[in-house]
Image (spheres, rainbow, N blue to C red):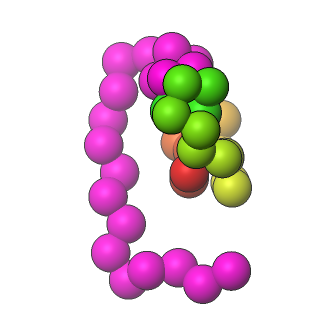
Amino acid sequence: MTFSPLVPEPYVRDIERSLGFYVTLLGFTVLYMRPEEGFAFL
């Protein structure tokens, strides 16, 4: 896996709700998570 030099990291109020939207509804896949920081790389 290669990473782009520019990775947007938008802040959200509810990471679980946001993941539900992006993963369940839109079909993205979580590639990496830092749960203690509320971060997910899709």
State left or right for residue 25 relative to residue 10. right
Locate residue 6: give its quadrant: bottom left
> Can see residue 36?
no
Q: Measured from the top left, where is residue 30 in percent x and y?
A: 66, 46
Q: Position of residue 42 (x, y in %)?
A: 56, 51
Q: x, y percentage for residue 38? A: 53, 33
Give 22 or 41, whichever is nearer the viewer: 22
Is 22 left, or right, of 36 in this rendering?
Answer: left
Q: Is residue 7 above or below residue 22?
A: below
Indicate whether 35 appears above or below 1: above
Q: Is residue 10 visible?
A: yes
Q: Quadrant of the N terminus?
A: bottom right
Query: Residue at horizontal 38%, vertical 83%?
Result: 5
Q: Is residue 38 found inside the magenta-colored segment of the image?
A: no
* The magenta segment: 1-21
Residue in front for this viewpoint, 7 or 26: 26
